[in-house]
Image (spheres, helix red, strand yellow):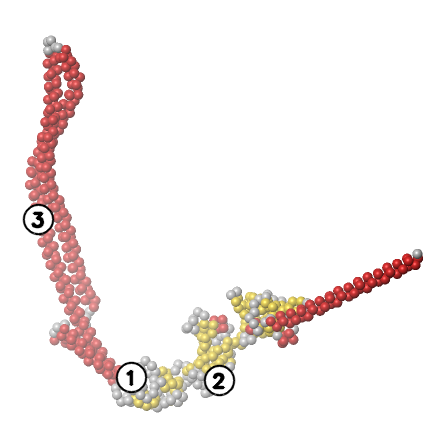
Amino acid sequence: MSEEISKLDQEKQKAEEREEEKGARKREIIKNIAIIFLSIMLVLTFFSNTIMNYSLPQVSTEMVSSGTIKTQVRGQGVIETVDPYNLTVKETRTIKAVHAKEGDDVKIGDILYELEGEESSELDSARAAVRDAETAYQKAIITNGLSAEQVLQVQAGASVNLIEIQNNIAAYDRQIEQFQAELDLRESNIQVLTLEKSRLDKTKAGDAAAWTIQSAIDSSTYEKESPGLNDKIDAYTNLVKEIEELKNKENPTKEDKQKLAEDEKKLPDVKKEADDAQARLNQLAEAKSNSALQATISGTKDADTTKKINEIQAQIDAETAAKSLTTQAKAEVEEKKKKYVDSMSTKIDAIDNYNKLLQAKEKVAKLEKEALGSTITSPVNGKVITMNKKSGEKTDPENPVAVLRVDGKGYRISFSVDNKQARTVKVGDVVHIDDYGYSDDTIVNLVAINPDKTDPQNKKNLVFDVAGPDLEVGRTLNVSVGDASASYDYTVPNSALDKDKKGDFILVLQEKAVPFGKRYVAKKVYVTKIYAKDDTRSAIEADIDPYGVYVITNSTKPLSGGQQVRLSTEAAQSE
């Protein structure tokens, strides 16, 4: 029995050992799987970071630092002569030969050009103008019919008094206005009298005709209605008579009594009809009599109306005659005015044509006196800047034939800058020459700051005097002016500054710690103020930490705020 128990215990122990061994193997497998998974994740993370880094924009950075900004305005100008002498001639002549070239030193009287022998086209034109003026003057004499005495007066210097002429014309105009006012009054009177005469004519004809027609109407009405009206009156008279007879009968019969009763019953109605008929008959008779009387009276009034009409017609005739005389008087004054104006115009035309002739002759005399001759010479001591004509070309009074630099006058350059730059410099500031090839003895001075004529609101023109040996007109000269400097807490490279619709900004490099490395993000920070700027750096004010801030100065791709970036090799080493 004990042996069996011992055997069972051994088997149970072996089973337990097998189970424990099986669990250990399972744990080992799980551990190996976990190690492999973590290894794979580590490898993937490493490679994903590497791949992502290579896809990001690569940037260069520089630390924000305090420093000194030195402001200078730079620009380029072309060397010009101060107040050059532009040599012009008043004649159009043909160049025969050129006796000087650019850069030659010349003295007063030195020959610059030799001219052909013909006269100038200006002199030819002036002489032609004299001929035209003579023709116009002669035509004016003939056309206007001037007498010999009038011609002599013109040639003796006769003149016209314009104020006197205007006063005389005004006097004529006042007479004409007075006559016109009188004509207007006469016309108004004629119109009023004509209207009154027309009214009386209509009244005369209308009254007689009206009463004649009314009388005929009234008579016709009376004749038409009177028979019926008389019948009603007679009916009443007969009825009254019949009633009296019936009442006075001694032995009336039953029928008589009945008839009497009927007649008395209708008597009031018949009486009323008879009364109305009598009233209407009286009305018709009165109207007939009245219209006949008025027709008779209107015939009597016609004589008075005819008299008044004749009197008004006499007044109309008198006003018309007076109007005719005034019209004639006005026409005579208008004719006098016309003759006076024509006479003065003729005189003015003749004087004007004669004066034009004298002026044309004076111009010919002046051109003959100022004729160039055969050469064009230098009027000053100096140096030839340009010779603008060649042999065979013609001179032009509007354009210089040569430009000369006068001895004793220097050189000048100028260039335009914006108002912000102009405010950083002043007349007398130190000027540096930024070009090689100029002598150390060359001196440049800022002498004027003027509004730029092309944009006076926003730009200024800086003007510099230039002195020194071997200066050449037309050669460019680069200069910088101004040496003002100041220290600032925050300065950044100019390449770090950018601008959008909201204003100037910088991209600040931000570092973030992540597993197995770091991440870098470009943060946009707006610049509240730019204090100063030189060729390389700018002094700014912005919401940034005072220490250890890096700004992005360059990128392999366009950047925006919040974008992840990677550092260039140099930037990574400096970190």
Q: Position of residue 33 (x, y in %)?
A: 73, 66
Q: Position of residue 440 (x, y in %)?
A: 51, 86
Foreground mark, 2 or 1? Answer: 1
Q: Residue at x 17, y 76 (%)?
A: 137
Q: Position of residue 267 (x, y in %)?
A: 16, 18
- In this figure, which residue is indicated by the disc labeled 1? 92
Q: In the rendered structure, which amino acid carries the disc numbered 3? A: Ala
Q: Residue at x 20, y 78 (%)?
A: 133
Q: Secondary structure at mark 3?
A: helix
Q: Secondary structure at mark 2?
A: loop
Q: Is residue 286 visible?
A: no
Q: Secondary structure at mark 1?
A: loop
Q: Which mark is residue 78?
A: none
Going by the picture, which residue comes out furthest to the top?
251
Question: Around disc 1, counting alpha carbons within 10 Å, would you say few (fewer than 14), some (14 to 19), or many (20 or more)?
Answer: some
Precedes in sequence: disc 3 or disc 1: 1
Q: How many marks?
A: 3
- In this figure, which residue is indicated by the disc labeled 3? 314
Precedes in sequence: disc 2 or disc 1: 1
Q: Is residue 308 visible?
A: yes
Foreground mark, 3 or 1? Answer: 1
- In this figure, which residue is indicated by the disc labeled 2? 442
Q: In the rendered structure, which amino acid carries the disc numbered 2? A: Thr
